[in-house]
Image (cartoon, grey):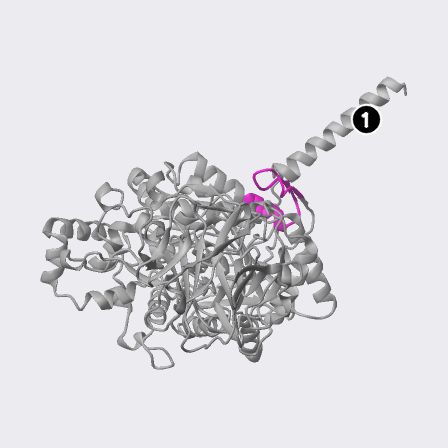
Amino acid sequence: MTLKKFIILVSITVLVLFTGYQAYYRLGIYLPQHREKLDYFMTTQGKEILKRGEDGKFAPFEIRGVDLGSGYPGEWAVDFAIDKKTYKRWFGYIQDLGANTIRIYTIHHQDFYDAFFEYNSQREKEGEEPLYLLHGVWVNDYVANSHNSAFDGAFLDTFLEDCRTVVDVIHGKASLKLGYQGEGSGTYRHDVSRWVIGYLPGVEWENTLVEYTNQINENKAGYTGRYLFTAENASPFETMLAMVGDKLIEYETERYGQQRMVAFSNWPTTDPFAYPLLVSDTRSKVNCVDVEHILSNDETYFSGMFASYHIYPYFPDYINIMREGEQHPQEEILEHYGRMHKELLEYRTSLLKAPRIEDYLRKEDYYDGRGRLNTYYAYLKALNRYHTIPVVITEYGITTGRGMAQQDVNTGRNQGHVTEQEQGKGLIECYEDIMASGCAGSCLFSWQDEWFKRTWNTMYAVDMSKTPYWSDYQTNEQFFGIMTFDPGREKSVCYVDGNLSEWEEEDLVVQNGDMTISMKYDEKCVYFLVYKEGFDQVTDTLYIPIDTNPKVGSTYAENEDIAFENAADFLMVIHGKNDSRLLVQERYEVLMSIYHEEYYAINPYYKENTPEADSPLFKRIHMPLKLKSLLPKVKDIPTGISYETGKLRYGNANPEAEDFDSLADFIFSGDYIEIRIPWQLLNFSNPSEMMIHDDYYGCYGIENLQIDEMYVGIGSAEDTRYRIRMTALPLKGWGKHVTSHERLKSSYYMLKDYWTSLK
């Protein structure tokens, strides 16, 4: 053979191999194969989920899972920065917890699947039970919240393709790129399908997407596939889901000869029920997605479907709103809405042709096994009573963030501002409610804290493009995990515990007679060590003015009758264990600048209402909880409900202490006081670059202002005749170079003790 022919032959061979590789691993092209027998190891029967044992027989299986995200400190979720070693360590922690399942929302980097394969292979080699996997299929946020209906190509074609890709990934037959810059590129070659129990296509569907799809696709209601089909009363959106599920099952059946359970993600906003007027209006509950309208062909699909819901105890608490609404006479409701608006809402609700939730509630449902009023349990009972298929709560959780966004007024399982111990207790109670209501399983949200997350009542105050680079203790959404990431490579720079050994002479910033302040900071907080000779922890009052913004602030606090050298923006008042707080100068109060109508019923951007730049009024710092009451009246305005987030909590914040309180802000130690203040509480929008809020009324809203120092001083109640001297603390951001270390929360160990004690 001549050299030329040899080169041509090699080139053709390489081209054929490359084309085949691309077709098989990237494009998912395959030849359907006829198989006499399909393989499946999970199935549903009535309200139960069953798993096939080694003896070939099916037995009830409880999904006891943990939701696992891809977020990591200093990285976005789409950076897929978690490595194989970390995943394997986490799998061990999760299995030790007493869980049997991991739920992921989307395709992860190949390191996840490599770790999952190696971990489970080793478990089986040792004769131990493996971890199982529920695999989600994500829908792009922009596509789901833009001008598309669910039948548009940008939505449906991508959704179908992503379903096929997930199937190929778990079977080890995919090569793809993930993330904005392709950081998640991977060759998926490990077949982990024998541990994958089901698929969860979709996300928490927005009202707008569901309603828009249903309105412009009325002629597309109804689908009949080989595996799934719709009931006569299915909506166009439910038709789309049936089609997606059918094609997913078809692809895996024909290409791999296997089947798995399928469930479509859902949440209360689009649950299958119709509600009274107040719920429909205040919570925009005007659409339904009902998986009972999606049916399966028992002759071709053997794994079965279950209903998947994300349900938390505090939001949206429809049943508590219903109870509250019952306290208002119909005449009052009619007066509030007006007859035409009331009839319009009732007409929109009637179009749903949905069952009334009242028909699925019983009086006894309102009280849990502890005998207390529990509308979370009642809602779970209604769902289970309605559905004919297994119900799995694939998200429930409680966050340990310092900030709070919602309240569970009945059981105290709030969204935020709970300790790690309270989180553990609340998670156990939620789990008990879920299982007592008849559910077939659950997945707690979530395994790890994720710094990049946002929350409705703080997202306006931070730079959303830099959230992974600092731990925002005020944003509760970042702290749902039962494993957290504390700043510092091995330990934090400071623990508010009264132990002074971590403080050095170079930390000294302020000295004023017999009083001093030392300071340091990390990715989460600013720390203060305050000293006053002969300090009386009960009667003494100390004032710590803080000046960050050079454009606003006051040299005098009239409500405390204390003066400062610099124009302070904040004033910390230390007065006993129960009455210490951080105050903010009126001009620099973010609540008024953003939510003035809801909480002040005035517009401060009108010149006559704008606080003076040097206003001497220092106000308590509040965080929004509700923007309006259930039936607001003119005489009741402002109607917003908030809580004082600037109040400082006394306790020991060292995780190794027996009396550990994860929410503690300060502690006394003889003549010393140790304090920590979260960055956002000082109006920092991005401390990684030392960005704070600029003057709201000079910028007409929130704009960023970079600073390189803050001024701090200290005085006592006896110093009212003098201006408190203030000294500069140099500030230098850390950019994207964050430090962190893992720590299992107290809630992890509480849940572990509970779960491992169960059968």
Q: Which residues are magenta?
A: 164-186
**Which quarter of the rendered picture does the N terminus lie within?**
top right
Residue at horizontal 43 percent and vertical 47 percent from the top = 549
- Residue 392: quarter of image: bottom left
Specify whether 294 is left or right of 93. left
Residue closest to the eye, 444 or 128: 444
Q: Is residue 570 magenta?
A: no
Q: Is residue 22 above or below residue 5?
A: below
Q: Is residue 53 visible?
A: yes
Q: Is residue 416 above or below residue 28?
A: below
Specify whether 397 is left or right of 325. right
Q: Which residue is mark 1?
A: 10
The percent position of residue 354, horizontal first and vertical second, equals 27, 56
The percent position of residue 670, horizontal first and vertical second, equals 53, 77
Q: Is residue 180 magenta?
A: yes
Amino acid type assigned to the residue bearing label 1 in the image = Val
User: Under tag 1, what secondary structure?
Assistant: helix
